Image (cartoon, coloured by chain):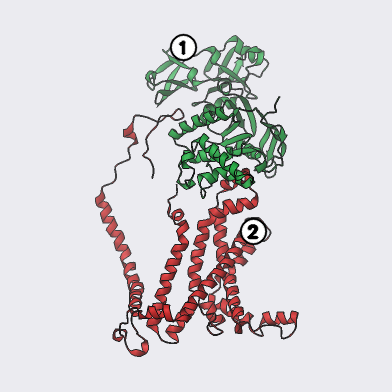
Amino acid sequence: MTAPKLELVDLYKEYGDGSVAAVDGVDLVVEAGETVALLGPSGCGKSSTLNMIVGLEQPTSGDIRIDGKSVVGVPPGRRNVGLVFQDYAVFTHMSVRANLGFGLSVRGGDRQAAARRVEEVAELLGLTSILDEKATRLGGSQLQRVAIGRTLVVRPAVLLLDEPLSNLEAESRQAMRRELRRLQAEIGLTIIYVTHDQIEALSLASKIAVMSSGKIVQFDSTERVYDRPNHVFVAGFMGSPPMNLVRGELAEARFARKGFSLTLPAALAASAQGEGREVTLGIRPEQLRLVQDGAGTLSGRVALVQPRGAEAVVSIETGGVTLQALVAAANRPDEGASVGLAFDAAALTLFSGETGRSLHGKNGLAA
Amino acid sequence: MRAAKVPILDASTYSNHGQPALQREPSAPSDRGGAKRRWFVRGLMLPGQILSLIVLITPLAVAFYMSFTDWAPTRGSLAAASFVGIENYQELLIYDTRFVEAVVRTLLLAIVCLSIEFTLGLGLAVLFLRKFRGKSLAFSVILTPMMVLPVVVGYTFWMLFQSNGPVNQIIELIAGPGSAPEWFRSTPFALAIVVITEVWHWTPLFFLILLSGLNAVPENPVRAAVILGASPRQVFWRVVLPMLKPVIVVAFVIRSMEIIKLFDEVFMLTRGGPGTSTETISLYIYKLAFNDFQLAYGAAAAFLVLLGTLTLVHILLAPVRDQLLEARR
């Protein structure tokens, strides 16, 4: 059995007086060939985590293992990790060839082998025709490919990309997304994306680690993170618009808050047994269907319609709660109209009002 | 060059594709107001331009004409002087060894001084990238020489190196009486003092320019190099210094223009002596004009220097011209 490519063990990082931990006990295991997105809002500790993995910062405590070996204290250049910066950080005073060859040339060694390796990587990334261009003449996606190639030349065990798509225009973003997936498939790279953009994470990674306040809240496959968030934070962070979340109290199977009440399916209500009465009820906007007034489980008034191309986000006020529903643009109601809301009971998610944890998985209800 | 903004529908965005009317730029304001405004702006600049025409262009034109005559103030007005064509220039370039020597000497002084100033300035600037106690005090102290008048600097160093000055007293204290040299009577020593004075005076300028350049070097390429395995030395020589190139060139351009005009310090220190062995171009032209009253000949020399400086500056700027002129992405 081979060791995981990257392991973070109880990683801590404190700055200044140590009253606040930027990274607060992160555990993460990335197997060879996996693509993982480290996703979180700015200030959640993902950049500190990234810097510790590549060695630009030292952890306060905890361990980082690459290919099973601890790299804490090992200088960045000897860790066998590659990092592609958000702004690419290509050496603008050099040609593309010199950029690609930099990693090998600073290490010394066989020049001819190095030149061959550069050609090889250039071929892989489609840079052969611009090898002798100055880096200042390149556009955004070319710069990014140079930045990726520069790290690939030294064959890193793990490749980290910081916000890889955020500086690209929409068109090249699509192309780069395909390119990264192709690279991953072709050479079996282990890739970690660090991003605050959930769409970037959803489209690039096979697994997502959602971070908040220095902790990993959920680490799971992309689909499960989206469909079965295990924490209110993940639910409210993922999706555009994010999951509708309503705080209230649960008595038996009856979920209630001022002016809003709903009878939950018995199985779902049972999962909350033994918890406090405070819960948060969640449902994805795309799981809400607009129906004739009176025909659905809930009824309300359309407060706002935000069209966005093929779809529209409809905000519906019901019993003092505003819910967002995602509907096809053709079916969007008029503002001020009265509508009914229908949904499958299975689409509902319950979170503990105290800890924010999902109550799924208890009593065998987990999907 | 930027491609026209075309809305592209992407899974990650919800752009309103197919609504080009909304994307169109608002039409440009009519040009009539613009023309009026342009004339107003020109009108504002006119007094300044007239002034510069009177105090700058006219004397320059007069001097340029003068350089083709044999005029001297002892021989009546400039209008009465006879036109000699390029005779002055010929004389200067072919027969006047004192001029040619002054040119070569000034250039050599420039090379030696600028090399030392650059090395010291860069070293100090790199030192200032770190934190240390008393950094802000050291910063002020290092910058001080630059603010002293050149005449004062020249006079101070002249005093320091007098035959019974402080430097010699210290030397005699250590090495015994009679061991101190007569600094200003020996060509190599006199030249060395000129170099020392210049270096002391102008290293702060290199330091200041290079320090601001170093502080502006983007962090990420440096980090990228570190992650790719470059040693601190490799990072400095292969990443930081090349990125600093435009700043270095600008520092060299400013300083070489200044040192070609080197006058005050040499005038105070050696007056060009012993003999003419420390005479710079400026000093020679000054002597031509105000000791020998050969104003026309001096003007020709001055124009040659101007031409030389122009060429030199352009040669220096050539490698970074694109970088400096290129618009920011």
Q: Chain of mark 2?
A: B
Letter of the green chain: A
Q: Residue at x 33, y 75 (%)?
A: B61
Give the labeled residue for mark 1. A296
Q: Which mark is residue A338?
A: none
Within 10 angstroms of label 1, few (less than 14), some, or many (20 or more) residues? some
Amino acid type of the residue that numbered disc 1 sits on in the rendered structure:
Gly
Amino acid type of the residue that numbered disc 2 sits on in the rendered structure:
Leu
Q: Residue at x 51, y 39 (%)?
A: A144
In percent of width and height, residue A174 lies at: 46, 31
Secondary structure under the numbered disc 1 in the rendered image: loop
Camera-side residue of A45 and B329: B329
Letter of the red chain: B
Q: Residue furthest left?
A: B32
In percent of width and height, residue A262 lies at: 54, 14
Camera-side residue of B83 and B134: B83
Within 10 angstroms of label 2, few (less than 14), some, or many (20 or more) residues? few
Q: Which mark is residue B127?
A: 2
Q: Horizontal placement of A323 versus B294: left or right? A: right
In percent of width and height, residue B131 lies at: 66, 55
